[in-house]
Image (cartoon, rainbow, N blue to C red):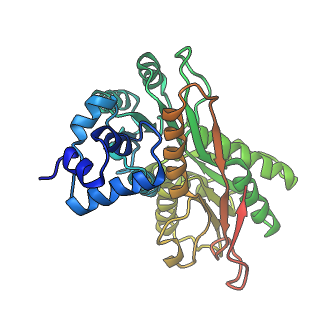
Amino acid sequence: MATMADVARHAGVSVATVSHVLNDTRPVLPHTRQAVLDAIETLGYTPNGLARSLVTARTRSIGLAVSAISNPYFTEILQGVEASALEHGYSLLIADPHDDPVHERKVVQLLHERRVDGMIVAPSADPGELIGYLGRHGVPTVFLDRLVDDVPAPGFTFDQVSAENTEPVTHLVAHLAERGHRRIGLIAGLAGLSTTSERITGYRLGLAGAGLAYEERLVISGNSEAAGAERATASLLSLPAPPTALITANNAMTIGALRAVRARGVSVPGELALCCFDDFAWADLFSPRLTAVSQPSKEIGAEAVRLLLERLGSPGRPTRTVRLPSAFVHRTSCGCPESRPEKGTVS
């Protein structure tokens, strides 16, 4: 098995130079760097990651805590994180917090104990203990999708990345109002999440822009999951004056809403127009095809890695919150014909 000394001899450089190329600890002239890389390729040298981490105090690993198993949207984010991490030479340690604040705190501690260089976390609706732990230990962190405003850990700095939430929902409401709907319902997400509050804000702004009154009974929480949305949709359809249009605030809740609609024999879009926040792979296979807001999930994951690596490289830089635009995917569940335009950006 080739050693670092073998690489140095083959490239005609010192062992220290090979180390600087591998660990990126000091600038190396381009032709020298290439000679080292060529020697590594020729000799089949494999760096000792454990030994390198002992020298650099870095493991080149990232801890990712998202509820990917229970939420398909986070699965796509995970793909974006993984691709970007690998591109930059980092490995991932993944844990599922199950959107539970107590479990969230435990899995983040476990990731930290495995000496990850930093964390990417989609925080729960009650992230106080999580933020307290990260702050006490000074863990470089990026929050994704769900943004955090109140920080109970003084001096704790973090970056954030999320899709736009408010304007896309305003756009959905405006679109349904243009179709003649005056009673538009909303299946909202789990209380306490920034995504939930921002999408409710977008809903209210859309109503106001269309000259429609806000009716509290037309907004019911589906708790961001299918079963909750199924119950919430059934409740809306049982009202004396049920909505003629419905917006679901994530993809899991769209599935629950469709179950409730089917159970009651309600036709979409004939009796109920439907739009959803979060597009998903099979949305185009439903009949009717689902009109949706598509979030740039893979791009969110890649941006989270970029922000974390910038933080690792420059710990004292100002914090950043990045918002990425969503896209309006225009299909037929809203009542529009097939000939309408398919897609447009909503920021």
Residue shown at the point (22%, 35%) measured from the top left:
51
| Residue 113 image point, x, y percent | 28, 27
Question: Farthest right residue?
Answer: 211
Horizontal side of residue 94 vs 217, given as left or right: left
Residue 39: image quadrant is: bottom left
Residue shown at the point (55%, 56%) measured from the top left:
299
Residue 240: image quadrant is: bottom right
As displayed, is residue 179 above or below residue 98? below
Horizontal side of residue 340 vs 232, given as left or right: right
Q: How many marks?
A: 0
| Residue 163 image point, x, y percent | 62, 50
Q: Is residue 196 visible?
A: yes
Q: Is residue 240 visible?
A: no
Question: Farthest bottom residue?
Answer: 339
Question: Farthest left residue?
Answer: 1
Residue toward you, 215 or 67: 67
Residue toward you, 226 or 123: 123
| Residue 313 image point, x, y percent | 50, 34
Horizontal side of residue 67 vs 264, given as left or right: left
| Residue 288 image point, x, y percent | 57, 78
Horizontal side of residue 308 vs 322, given as left or right: left
Name the quadrant of the C terminus.
Answer: bottom right
Residue shown at the point (60%, 53%) measured from the top left:
236
Residue toward you, 305 or 88: 88
